[in-house]
Image: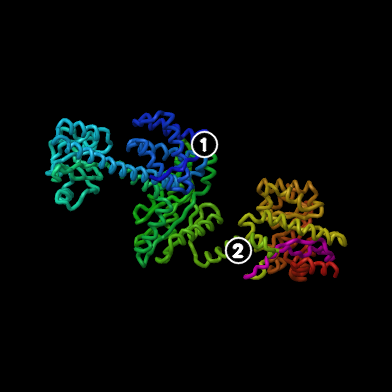
Amino acid sequence: MSELHHTAGPQEAPRERVILARKWAYLLHSTVFLPLSQDGLENELHVLLDDVCSAVRGEPARARAAGAKLVSLGCGLDAMSSTLDTLGKGLLGLPEFRPVERFAEPAMLALGQLATGFADASRRLTLEQQEEIKESLLKAVQDANWDLRASEARFDEVVTSSASGIMLTDLDGKLVRVNEAIADILEYTPAELTEMVLFDLVHPDQADILRGDFQSMVDGKRERLKQPLQLLRKDGDVARITLTASLLRRDDDGPSHFVTVVEDGTEIMLLQGELNRQALHDVLTGLPNRQFFSTYMESALRKADPEFGVTLIHLDLDAFAMICNGLGREVGNHLLKTVSQRLRAVVQHETAMVARFDGDEFGILVENTAATPRVIDLVASINNELSEPIYVDGHGLAVSASIGVVHRPSRTAEPSELLRAADFTLRRAKASGRGQWELFHAEQDANDRRTYTLAAEMPGAWESGQIHVRYRPLVDLTDRRLAGVEALFEWRHPRLGTLPHNRCVELAEQTGLILPLGEWQIKTAAQQVGWWRQRQELPLVVSLTPHQASDADLVARVVRSVEDPSTLMAGMPAGALLAPEAADNFRVLADMGVHTVLDDFGTAPDELALVEDLPVRSVRVARRLVERQAQSAINAPLSVALMALVPLVQRAGAAVTIDGIDSRGQANWWRVVGADLAMGSLFGTPCAPGEFSVYLAR
């Protein structure tokens, strides 16, 4: 038996573990007889609970050893059933195993190891008991030519206390003596059994085989027999047992009787079957889990119809977190159960599997035929089914789903790769808004993977000095006088060459790197512009991303990076300022003296309202509008709208900046319209500090 790892005792254990071990001990002590006091049992179970918890975290051998220890404590099947029920509910209630979705599967696997250790130790104990019985009976045979009374007393002494079924049969299989345990297994009385033949209790398909095996022991061809067997109970039901039999011999070495030990494996088989099921199924909904789904998909791909293939659907419930936070987790769990039932209803006429992955994510695999609905119809059916109200505790809930679909993938594709592709496709659908769906496209997926790869490489590139700050001029449109300098990113990628500012910002925004990277940009540029400011007054211009605009530490980052806030022109996207956090940051920066700018400004009424509602010092017209206007006629609707926009903004007290001036014609048009400041390739492209110093001198 494996040596158990003794960890912290009850005094040192977390409070929640102490409570669970106490409950476990109470239930065992009240349901089965154990040769331990309540306190003694509780101390033993504290240690075993620590071992099971360690198994959940990746040490399965400790749970198996704990199961063996339960046998040595005297626990039988009733105790094991109570143990699995208690720990199955209690383990995932411990704070250390949250979130539940992450630890549900490891916990079930740990309990499976516990049951396996218990079963293995029980079998070993049965063999040991069988040897003890055999020796005791042999001794009884040898005593005084079978002194009947003595032998019966000796038999009773050995077998009465055994939890395993024990039978003594003559050479023809007639039962001579049995104990209560085998009578309980077969639901007969001991008296009824001693009128029967063992082979009549065996399932007809196995009776002749067992009779032949017993004869081989009589013939000396084998010493012992051990095999799984099906015995018939009194009511005709089958008892699945493990039978171990040995031959007893007389003084003259002739065969005398058979001693047979029976271990009832029905409950253990049921428990192990249930644990195996739980290891492959979601505890809450009963659906297959990701592991089972992946295995099923591998098989389905191999046997898929070459013409129709399979369809993989990965969906995520929209606003599920809002429902849980607002109405409680129990309502959310009820919703998940109902959703699982409705998803199965959608594909009930198809050869399909529905699985729950994690949280509020589900997967569906459909093995297509000529009658399978089109993908667009399947997706519509899913959202139509989910949109029907679900009533929970008086609340009528309806949900939508964002869905990613991989249709007819290659039959040689790896399941893990298909799950990744479906997940990527789902993320694209979610980016388009709630209730949207996307179909997987290999080319788009390749582009996305390149983007994600670059985003993952970016921190290392920053650390190794591949990312630099570059500068370009902001000029006054009336006289082209230098009015400021904008700080931009540039990534000198060793394989892809130079990546411009917008690409760098897009990548950093995806991973959250933009927060520390943006602070470094402001600090680096502030130091450089401070040196140039010794010769000429130059505001530093930076454009913040939506993530930066809503950053709770934005003001602190600016304070750490800039000595004089009045020398900073900080822009925030107009769309981001609809969020309260960004609007608060905007006001605080303005109060500090920062020249606040409304970036990506358009013609929408709510953006014009921002100029009045917030302390806006200037606006930067959206570059897409500047580029479209350059291709439009003077009297085109867009041109007319922009000509009206500039004086409206200026009357509200804000200056107008134009980004993207690439020609003199553009510059002249915007100057006539009345714009104040401009930047673009006409005035200078982003360059290194040394080149910008030359620009300043020129």
Total labels drawn: 2
Residue farthest to the right, as pictured: 535
Reading the chain from its start, which is encountered first: label 2 or label 1?
1
Q: Is residue 145 left or right of residue 514?
A: left
The span picked out in magenta is 468-495
Residue 592 percent across, percent down from the top left = 79, 47
Q: Is residue 108 left or right of residue 324?
A: left
Within 10 angstroms of label 2, few (less than 14), some, or many (20 or more) residues?
A: some
Q: Quadrant of residue 644?
A: bottom right
Q: Is residue 321 left or right of residue 245?
A: right
Distance in Å between CA atoms under marks 2 and 1: 45 Å
Residue 424 percent across, percent down from the top left = 51, 59
Quarter occupied by the C terminus: bottom right
Disc 1 marks a residue whose amino acid type is Ala
* Circle 1 residue: 13
* Circle 2 residue: 454
SS at mark 2? Answer: helix
Disc 2 marks a residue whose amino acid type is Leu
Residue 196 percent across, percent down from the top left = 13, 38
Q: Nearer the viewer, mark 2 or mark 1?
A: 1
Residue 654 percent across, percent down from the top left = 78, 54
